[in-house]
Amino acid sequence: MSQIYQQFAEAYSRGSYPEFSKWVLTLLPSLLEKYSLPLSGRLLDLACGEGTFLEGMLLNNWQVTGLDQSAEMLRLAEMRLKQTGQPFHLIQDDMRNLDFDNEFELVTCWFDSMNYLLELSDLERVFSRVFRALKVQGGFLFDMNTLYGLFVRWQQQPVYISQDHEDLFEIHIPSCNYEKSEASLRIILFMRDPQTHQWNRSEEVHTQKAYPMDTIQALLEKVGFQVLDRLGNLTDQSPAQPDSGRVWFITQKPA
Ligand SMILES: C[S@@+](CC[C@H](N)C(=O)[O-])C[C@H]1O[C@@H](n2cnc3c(N)ncnc32)[C@H](O)[C@@H]1O
């Protein structure tokens, strides 16, 4: 299993990152309604992370399953979801091993998690396993960083400080490999031990790959999905453009 999102998990949950899930949660009901996708039932959130999205969906009466490869992210998700007092299911696994058949009304995967799949064959494998996991007419919604997102937006600042607190300091250093269509983020963390007050340094390198939007769409259609929309902005629901930093796919398993 990959070693990312271990030390970084706690910093992630303390940072502004979970705001992304909160924002998606506010927009999702209207999106599901607009595209006539299921409004209730069983949800599978791939790469669920620390569980903010699952928590919101659980509180909106969805039956939730979360899958993530990081034990630390899942530990945080479990703590969060237990507080709701409702049943939930968490799985530690690589999403490439997804193995469900005709079980979910909705599958989601947010905040560039699909960009961690560094081979086109892995993307196709996950898409086809999601297709199999969905019930007929179920929806599959996800976002990805685009080529523009990774090679222009990510590279705008050579170094930046993502968090600066009394006990936590987080620095990001981006770089990119055009030949491989990959960009990496070197995340350097300093966290103060609450007992000894000593600073501990750790580092994770997060590599993401971007794929042309047409390639992603062609793969989705190849495994059987109907692509209902390809948005560049979730708030105004405008179509994705070549200079959109992120693309949102709204897809359905047809009847
Ligand atoms: C940017 S975080 C997003 C977490 C959550 N979806 C959110 O919106 O906050 C990326 C997540 O993807 C997970 N991840 C990356 N590659 C994965 C894989 N191949 N299988 C399962 N989880 C993966 C990481 O462990 C991490 O929790």
Image (cartoon, rainbow, N blue to C red):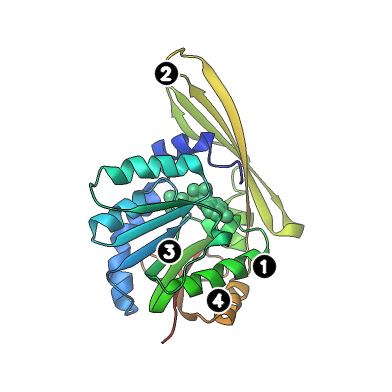
Position in image of residue 224 (x %, y %): 53, 82
Horizontal relation, residue 117 to residue 41: left or right = right
Disc 3 on helix, strand or loop? strand
Number of numbered discs visible in the structure rendering: 4
Residue 160 numbered tag: none
For this orientation, the residue located farthest to the right is: 179
Q: How far apart are marks 2 and 4 (CA)?
A: 47 Å
Dot 2 or dot 4, earlier in sequence: 2
Q: What residue type is labelled 4?
A: Leu
Tell me, yes or no, whether the two marked residues, 4 and 1, touch with CB atoms within 8 Å.
Answer: no
Residue located beneath label 1 in the image = 121
Q: Distance between the residues labelled 4 and 1?
A: 12 Å
Q: Is residue 67 above or below residue 197?
A: below
Q: What residue type is labelled 2?
A: Pro
Tell me, yes or no, whether the two marked residues, 2 and 4, touch with CB atoms within 8 Å.
Answer: no
Q: In which quarter of the image is the C terminus?
A: bottom left
Q: Distance between the residues labelled 4 and 3?
A: 14 Å
Name the residue rendered at 50%, 25% in the picture. 191
Disc 1 on helix, strand or loop? helix
Position in image of residue 51 (x %, y %): 38, 48
Dot 2 or dot 3, earlier in sequence: 3
Residue 220 numbered tag: 4
Tell me, yes or no, whether the two marked residues, 2 and 3, touch with CB atoms within 8 Å.
Answer: no
Residue located beneath label 3 in the image = 108
Q: How far apart are marks 1 and 3 (CA)?
A: 20 Å
Report whether the residue tagged 4 is closer than 8 Å to ligand 1. Answer: no
Q: Which amino acid does label 1 sit on?
A: Ser
For this orientation, the residue located farthest to the top is: 196
Count residues near mark 2 (Cα–Cα under 10 Å), then give few for <14, some for 14-19, many for 20+: few
Q: How far apart are marks 2 and 3 (CA)?
A: 36 Å
Disc 2 on helix, strand or loop? loop
